Structures are given as C-alpha cells and as structure tokens.
Image (cartoon, rainbow, N blue to C red):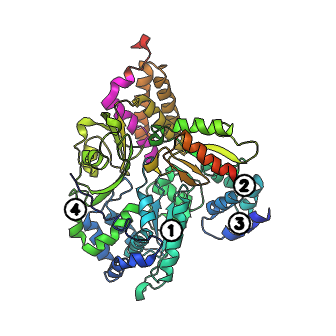
Amino acid sequence: MDKVQDIALRYKDLPGGLIEALHAVQEEYAYIPEDALKQLAIAFKIPQSRAYGVAKFYSYFSVKPRGRFIIRICKSAPCHVQGAAEVVQTLEKELGIRLGETTKDNQFTLEPTECVGACEQTPVITINGKPYGDLNPAKVKEILAGYKQQQ
Amino acid sequence: MVEEFRICLKNYGLIDPEKIEDYLNRGGYQSLKKALTIPQSELVAEVKDSGLRGRGGAGFNTGVKWGFSLNTPADQKYIICNADEGEPGTYKDRIIMQSDPQLVLEGMAIAGYAVGASKGYIYCRGEYPYVVERLKKAIAQAEMAGLLGTNLLGTDFSFTVEVRMGAGAYVCGEETALIESLEGKRGEPRFKPPFPGVAGLWGRPTVVNNVETLANLPWIIEHGAEAFKKIGASKYPGTKIFTLTGDVAKKGFCEVPTSATIRDIIYGFGEGVANGKSFKAVQIGGTSGAFLPEAQLDTVVDLDSMTAAGGSLGSGATFVLDETRDLVEIAATIAEFFEHESCSKCTPCREGTFRSHEILKKIAAGEAGVKELEDLESLMDLMMKASFCGLGMAAPTPTLSLLKHFRSEFEDRLRRDEN
C-alpha cells in the first residue's frame, strides 16, 4: 500500500500525528484497512494493538469497508424530535439497506451519528462530511438522486 | 425585551471571513498589539478582573486558569482552543469560527503571550471539516501578514497555531481527554491533579480554553475589564451565545448579556413555541443539561442563577419541548447518547450509562415496575458520585431533572401490577 506509506512518512514525525494519519488513510480508502493499520503502527513505533485501539475508539473511523458515499444520520435529541426517524426510513427504503449497512454496489453506507452541530436545520444528515438540513422524505429523495447521478 | 449584544459575533455577517483585510479593517489585531505592550502578569490580572469565565460549560475564571500556567516554569507551554463542541443542539463555536476565524486566532495569540506559550492548537471536531479548511486558510493569511509566526509586531513573542481534527468522540470535549487525543491516543480522560495548567500536553503547562472564551479576549483587551464587568450578571459578566432547537417557532442563535432570562431567549428570540402549542419543558446547556418547567422560565441565564434553579448553563444550547412531547421517550433517547459516548474507562459510567438506557427503554415500553425506577435513581446517584470524569457525572442530570419536575409521566408508564 504505497499510498499508506506516503501518509506514514508525512505524519510519523508530527507529534501526536497518528489521528491525522488515520484521517488521511480514511480519506483515501473510506475506511482503515488492516494492512494500513499495521504499516502505521510500524511507522509510529507503536504496537499494532494500540493503533487498532485508537482507530476503534473514535466513531469517525471505521475498520470495516464502506461505500463511496457515507451518509450519517443524526439521532441526537434535537434531530430526534424533528423527525429523524422518518429520514432514516426514507433512506433505508430508497437504498434498500438498513442502518449500518453498505449497498451492494459499494456506493452508499448508512450510519447513525450523534449531533453534527448543524442544529439550526434539524433534522440533519451528512454525506461525506457535508451537512444537509431541514429534511423531509421528498428532500432526501432529491439529494440521493443527485448523488446517484455521480455514479 | 432584551437586545442582543455582540462581542464574540461582533463581525458576524459584516466581513468576508476568508479575507484577513476585512478583519483588520474592523480593528482586528489591535488588541494583540495592545496586549503585547502590557507585562504578562498585568495582562493575566486584567482578564481575571474582567470576571470572564469559561464558556465551555464549567465556568472557571479564565484569568485564574491562566495564572497556573504563567506561574509554572517550563521550556514549552501550550494554548489549546477547544473547538470540539459535541453537546447536541450546540453550534455556537462553529458560527464563531465560520464567521470570524481571525478573532479566534487573535484570542489565542493574546492568551499565548499572557502565559508565555509559543504554540497553539485548535482541536476542531471531525464533524466540521469545512471549518477546519477555513481555519487553515485563516492561519496562512495571519502568517503572511506577520500576525502569527516569529517575533510578532516587532517583539520577542512568537506564536504559531496548528489545527487538529477530532474524530467523533464527545468525551474529547473534556480537557484532559482532548489532550490525550491531541497526543494521538484514545481520548480517555486523565486523573486530576495535576491539572493541564500545570502539566497538560506532553506534560507541559497548557491552557485549554473554549472557542467562545477566546473570542471574548480581543474585546476585553480593547475596552478593559471594567467595561466588560458592566455587561450582564455581576458574577458571570459578559454575553453568552444561545442556540435554539426543538419546538421553537424560530430556530437560530443569539448572543445576549448574561442578565437575560430563559423567557427572553425562548419568547424573544425563538418567538415562542412552534405551531401555536403550549410550552412543556426546556433543556439548557446541551444534552447533559437539566430540564426546567415553565415555572422557572424567569431564571436569569448566568451560570450561578441557573445552577441555583437546579438547571445548568453549559454550552447554551436551548432545547424546547412542547406539550405533546413524550418525556420518557426523550429521556431514553438521551440515555442512548450517553451509552454510546461513554469512553468505557471507568465502571460507574460504562455500566451506568448502559443500564440507565436499558431501564429507561423498559419504562418507555411500559415493561418496568416501581423497583426498576428506584434502581434507576439509585444507579444515577452512584454515577454522579463515582464516575471518573464529568461525562458520567452529568449523564444522569437530564433524567433526574425530568423525574423532579415531571415524575408522574414516568410513574404512569410503570407496570400496573406494581403500581
């Protein structure tokens, strides 16, 4: 994994740089592959178990393969009372997967998340980090259509 | 009706946040220039006298906090800007950083000079990648303009800032967990003492200040401690940003003097309860805050008045619920949040948040009896007393406040055979 090697070189001497390196790996692969973790552990001179422990601690990092577009749905109280469940139902129906799953074509992953700090427009989802708010089923379908066209 | 008073949001909507020239044209960095002419100990005393208290929720006097670092000799000291706002319903730090990133950098430089720190970190939550980009641009522009870097404004003082991105862990808002994360580790809180002011990042004296706290500093240096003290409540002077969510007619934010009341915020800025319904409860301070009933809407929002009323100020998130809301179900949703966000380091929090959620789900489903409600209260008492950090101590607050003010809603859901 040459790209991981480049990332390791870029961050290994940065104090506390492991988390920055994990962000960079995930940016590249949409998740943290096991081999990447092994390479980072060597570069940062830490046991593999510790690198794994760090990756597993943070909900932003996934050690399981995910789709190209990661849809995160806020389920914190302010979004919850404004209809987050309806948004989840629409997404599950439109994509044919349940929360926590990835579509067969590896395009979309649905994940629950806690507050994303865009609460002036509840309920909110993020797609690859970009927030979409004031959602209802019709708006969700429209947004999804835009991403499906990018395939 | 209370009017807004903008200190942290003084440039909101008035400047292009990606142009440092706009910030400079509005008097930007004049406070840093002024601060650099004041001896460090006098500067710390000025901030202490202003009465500015941490806006992240704990409300500790900022100048006193700085004093610990100033008075601890070290080869290196650090300023950390805590931009890991994770309290559900809170986005105040985001709007400050988005609308006026240079203000935060200037505040950090002032803090750095005051305590003798040459390096600053902004720990920004992973949910804000677009804010991280904006901050990085702002840092590059400040470096180009000679306002960050070495020998600032012809003095011996040097200060650089680096942005680090969090990765979705609520507990990292706790300052020692944040420091662990900055060091590239799992974000588990440290035992205190030593406090970060004495031994923080890589064991060096470290000031951790919230974004909103730092954003107050340029104003305080420009206008002086006396002027700041005259704004808002005497024991918690200045302003506070509130973000309105839930069943309010108008969602949004406002920055008001701390002498405002909860009613001013909900009915003045939020325009009351949405869809013509009646008010039931409000939770202030984020998901770890206490719920308050209508009878307490005239409470002044400064930290001490809120605490005295059995509430909290916290982050200033204001979550309004109308008469139709199922409070038991909301308590269960909040309990699920804490179960997910507990870092699992200590048993009272790890097991306590798990069992609290379990029992609340059962109550909501009508499957729990009197005994389980008693168990829940006893468990929560233990969590508040024995948890390692603030997360586990605060997790019971929303449920206990609902039990205090709306107990019958929980009791009505218990199994009939035991009622």
The answer, for residue B187, to whether it is visible in the render is no
Q: Is residue B403 magenta?
A: yes
Q: Name the residue under label 3.
A: A7
Q: Mark 2 points at which residue?
A: A48
Name above or below for residue B134 compared with residue B298: below
Magenta-colored span: B388-410
Principal SS element in the magenta part?
A: helix
Q: Name the residue under label 4.
A: B231
| Label of residue B290 in the image | none
Q: Is residue B131 magenta?
A: no
Pointer 3 local density, CA inside 10 Å: few below 14, some 14–19, many at least 20: many
| Label of residue B135 in the image | 1
In three-dimensional space, the C-alpha distance between marks 3 and 2, rounded to whole angstroms, equals 17 Å
Residue B219 at x, y = what percent?
A: 30, 70
Asked if badges 2 and 4 are on one and the same chain, I answer no
Residue type at the position of mark 4? Ile
The answer, for residue B114, to whether it is visible in the render is yes
